Structure formats: structure tokens, C-alpha cells
Image (spheres, helix red, strand yellow):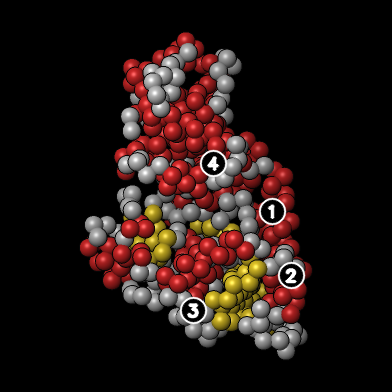
């Protein structure tokens, strides 16, 4: 593909992303699957163009308004023209050559666009007149929530969130250990480093054709952020236990929980989306896992929950959330988020916690996790739950970390808070609550394995 064709493809994909027809990574991935002629360099260049716009959208819009004086629309084409110069360092002549109107390439620059490109050459991406939400590329309405989460470190954390994320892998201990996996990857030309915190984590800093690797195909490794790995490990799911992954989705943490249980016991993966649960089937088979029962729920109040009240040793709730901790991987998500979304999500999280807690056996544990930084979705939810559930008590993360991972946790306090700038992981929150051993709850006589 020519440079111009790559730019045109990026513009078209940005238009689809802006229309809200799916997550950026899914849209881009589907495009590459349909356009097999796009080589590795083409894919890399197209992705670089797209993510330059998604990560720096607020800054690009600010410059378009400042230099275009409102005459230029903040659409995909103009944003990408600005990103080519301001973010990727293209010279005006390069932009002109790429946008020549030939087949598969963008149309020629309008006079106002040509002036914009020329004016951006001498500009720095940061400008003293920018407000913080522009400089750090987040929606303005989120400012008070993010400041409450980070205080003086907000700028550092937002800068980390605007960078690309590494590829984190979890070694499947049912198939081998970390040394085996590292050697196997090296044999396929992939250099991996050991994770900083997870005993089963490996990190790769290059683009790799993961699906083509024998190491992946035979189930020795799975893609999972190190923060997500730690959340699953802190569940302390053991062999022979009865465990529920209440919001299982496509099964990333289900796989990690099953491995921690050494594929012995009973693990139920629940979700309201049958399609998401079906996506886990191939992953479970590849990982060699046989203890998982999938259960589609009508809602968090599904009758199945009542029938199995008090029947599980561990109930893991990876709650639906704003996903602010995943902006490195999903920068488009921040621009789709609204204050109404936050209100709806916090109400849903509260309802999920209340319902899922019924499944916890006396002496069992409820693990609440999100990939969010916001206190409304994290500490406030746990505080509200504990106030309404006197038979549950918080377990300090330090104690659980010591028995599951070893040593001291990387964050202080009774809960775990992980951030990209401090820990190099996605943003994660984990809190653990234990039910009193005499909770007065007995499971119904129906078998745990009943559908």
C-alpha cells in the first residue's frame, strides 16, 4: 500500500469508529481480516495513524479550532492531517504527496487544509493555553472524578494512559511453567520478559503474530494484562473449591481461575451475554480446561442465583465499569463515555454486588474488581455494600497477597489499586470481603452443577 492509501484507510476506519459501530480494536482487526493484501508494515502504519488520533483527539481538536478559526470541521480527515504533522512529524510536502486525489488515496488538500498543515509545523503538541483536560486528553466532565482519584499525580497518570500498552501474557500452568513458555517463545523468535508482579506473567514489547505461534496454539500462553492476572490470583481459588466468575465475559479471568484451581473443582462462568460466553469455548479447549460450566443469566437477579445461595467458596465479580483503567488499549472508549453512563454503571454495580453476595458460602469470599480508577465505582461501592451486609467483613489485601502471591502488595491500604504510571499495568481495583462462618445461609438441595 502507498502512504496515501494507508492514510485513506485510516480515515475510513476512524469514521466507522466515530459512528459508534464497535470498539476500535475490533473494527481495525475486522478490516485487516477482510483486507489480507495489507502487509505487516501497512497494518502497523494504519494502526499508528488511527491511534495517534484516538489518543490525542482533544489536543488535535484544540489545534484545529485555534488555527482553523472554526472553519475546519473536526472530522476524521482533518484530525488525521493534524496528527500527521503534530504527532507523527510529517513535513507538509509529505502530506501533499500522500493526499494527491489518486485512486485509493485522499483527495487533494483544500486551501484551508494546506494552511493548517503549514501552521502546525512549528507547533509543539503541548501549549500553555491548553486546559488540563485537553493537555491530557480526557473528557472535561471527568475532571473532578479523576482529580479525586489521583490528586497531584493526575498529569503523570494521564500521560501514561495516553501511551501504548505492552502485550502481557499469562503462562498456563496446566501446560507448563514460565521458563518453559519463555524458552518456547524465544524458539519462535519472540523475546519476552518476566512480569513485575505476577508469578505467571510475561511481557512482550514488540508486535507479534500471536495466533500463528505454536506456543499460543497449544495453550501454553494466554493474553491477559498483568493487573488482571493479579486480580484473579487474589481470589485464592484452590483445587476442589466451588467458584463463580459472575461477570465472566469472554473468559479471561475464568481461564486464570481454572488454572489456579489446577483444573480441579467446579467453576461456573456466568454472564448475561450468551455470545460473550460462547467466545470462551475455544479458549477453554485450547487451555485444556474441563471444570467450567457456562451459565447465561437473564440479569444479576436471575433465579439461578437464589437457587444456589450460599453454595460457593469464592464469588468473583469483575463488574461492568467505565473502563478508565484500559484507556491505553482502548483510547476510543473515553470519547464514548458520558456522565449518564457512569450513573447507570454505578447503579448496576451495586445491584450486581448485592445479588452475587448471596452465592457466597459461610466463610467464603466475595472478590470485587473493576478496571476503573473512579472512587464511585470502587471504594464507594464496597463501603455501600459492607454497610448493608453486616455478615461480610473486608479482608486486607496485604494478608491475601502474602498467601497467594507472596511478599508485600504494590499498593498500600486494604484494597489493591494498580495504575499504569506506578505499576506498568492497566488500571485495576480489587477488594475482598469474607462472609462470617455462621451466616445463617444454607444452599438449596439442588445440585451446584444443575443447569
Question: Which badge, 2 or 3, is on the more N-terminal residue?
Answer: 3
208 w.r.t. 110: above or below: below
Which of these two is toward me, 327 or 270?
270
- Determine which quarter of the picture holds residue 417: bottom right
Say which quadrant the N terminus sits in: top left
Question: Which badge, 4 or 3, is on the more N-terminal residue?
Answer: 3
Question: Which badge, 4 or 1, is on the more N-terminal residue?
Answer: 4
Circle 4 sits on which residue? 332
Q: How far apart, in angstroms, are the residues tagged by discs 2 and 4? A: 32 Å
Q: Nearer the viewer, mark 3 or mark 1?
A: 3
Q: Is residue 156 visible?
A: no
Q: Nearer the viewer, mark 4 or mark 1?
A: 4
Task: Give the side of residue 314 with respect to residue 105, left or right.
Answer: right
Question: Which badge, 2 or 1, is on the more N-terminal residue?
Answer: 2
Residue in the picture at 36% in, 23% down: 98
Which of these two is toward me, 409 or 351?
351
60 w.r.t. 242: above or below: above
Residue in the picture at 54% in, 76% down: 292
Residue in the picture at 55% in, 39% down: 17
Measuring from the top left, give residue 137's x and y in whole percent: 53, 36
The circle drawn on residue 345 is 1
Q: Nearer the viewer, mark 2 or mark 1?
A: 2
Question: Which badge, 3 or 1, is on the more N-terminal residue?
Answer: 3
Q: How far apart, in angstroms, are the residues tagged by discs 4 and 3? A: 36 Å
378 w.r.t. 324: above or below: below
Within 10 Å of the Cα at label 4, are there few (<14), some (14-19), or many (20+) other Cα atoms? many
The circle drawn on residue 302 is 2
- Determine which quarter of the picture holds residue 440: bottom right
Amino acid at each position: 500500500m502507498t502512504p496515501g492509501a494507508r492514510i485513506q484507510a485510516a480515515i475510513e476506519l476512524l469514521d466507522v469508529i466515530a459512528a459508534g459501530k464497535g470498539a476500535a480494536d475490533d473494527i481495525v482487526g475486522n478490516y485487516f481480516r477482510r483486507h489480507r493484501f495489507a502487509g505487516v508494515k501497512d497494518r502497523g502504519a494504519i494502526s499508528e495513524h488511527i491511534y495517534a488520533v484516538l489518543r490525542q483527539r482533544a489536543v488535535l481538536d484544540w489545534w484545529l479550532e485555534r488555527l482553523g478559526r472554526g472553519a475546519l470541521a473536526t472530522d476524521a480527515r482533518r484530525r488525521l492531517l493534524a496528527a500527521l504533522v503534530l504527532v507523527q512529524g510529517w513535513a507538509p510536502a509529505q502530506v501533499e504527496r500522500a493526499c494527491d486525489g489518486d485512486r485509493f488515496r485522499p483527495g487533494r488538500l483544500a486551501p484551508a487544509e494546506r494552511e493548517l498543515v503549514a501552521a502546525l509545523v512549528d507547533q509543539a503538541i503541548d501549549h500553555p493555553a491548553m486546559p488540563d483536560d485537553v493537555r491530557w486528553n480526557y473528557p472535561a466532565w471527568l475532571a473532578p472524578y479523576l482529580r479525586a482519584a489521583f490528586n497531584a499525580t493526575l498529569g503523570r497518570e494521564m500521560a501514561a494512559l495516553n501511551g501504548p500498552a505492552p502485550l502481557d501474557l499469562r503462562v498456563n500452568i496446566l501446560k507448563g511453567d514460565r521458563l518453559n513458555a519463555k524458552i518456547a517463545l524465544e524458539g519462535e523468535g519472540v523475546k519476552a520478559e518476566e512480569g513485575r508482579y505476577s508469578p505467571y506473567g510475561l511481557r512482550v514489547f514488540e508486535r507479534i503474530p500471536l495466533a500463528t505461534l505454536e506456543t499460543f496454539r497449544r495453550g501454553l500462553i494466554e493474553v491477559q494484562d498483568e493487573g488482571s492476572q493479579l486480580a484473579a490470583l487474589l481470589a485464592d481459588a484452590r483445587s476442589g473449591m466451588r467458584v463463580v466468575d459472575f461477570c465472566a465475559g469472554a473468559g479471561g479471568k475464568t481461564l486464570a481461575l481454572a488454572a489456579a484451581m489446577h483444573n480441579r473443582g467446579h467453576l461456573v462462568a456466568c454472564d448475561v451475554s450468551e455470545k460473550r460466553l460462547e467466545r470462551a469455548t475455544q479458549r477453554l479447549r485450547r487451555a485444556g480446561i474441563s471444570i467450567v460450566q457456562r451459565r447465561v443469566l437473564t440479569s444479576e437477579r436471575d433465579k439461578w442465583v437464589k437457587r444456589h445461595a450460599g453454595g460457593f467458596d469464592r464469588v468473583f465479580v469483575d463488574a461492568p465499569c467505565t473502563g478508565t483503567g484500559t484507556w491505553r488499549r482502548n483510547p476510543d472508549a473515553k470519547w464514548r463515555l458520558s456522565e449518564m453512563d457512569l450513573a447507570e454503571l454505578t447503579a448496576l454495580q451495586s445491584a450486581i454486588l448485592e445479588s452475587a453476595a448471596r452465592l457466597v458460602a459461610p466463610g467464603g469470599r466475595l472478590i470485587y474488581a473493576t478496571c476503573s480508577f473512579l472512587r464511585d465505582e470502587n471504594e464507594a461501592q464496597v463501603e455501600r455494600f459492607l454497610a448493608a451486609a453486616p455478615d461480610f467483613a473486608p479482608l486486607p489485601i496485604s494478608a491475601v497477597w502474602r498467601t497467594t502471591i507472596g511478599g508485600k502488595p504494590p499498593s498500600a491500604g486494604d484494597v489493591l489499586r494498580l495504575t499504569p504510571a506506578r505499576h506498568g499495568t492497566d488500571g485495576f481495583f480489587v477488594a475482598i470481603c469474607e462472609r462470617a462462618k455462621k451466616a445463617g445461609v444454607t444452599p438449596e438441595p439442588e445440585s451446584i452443577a444443575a443447569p
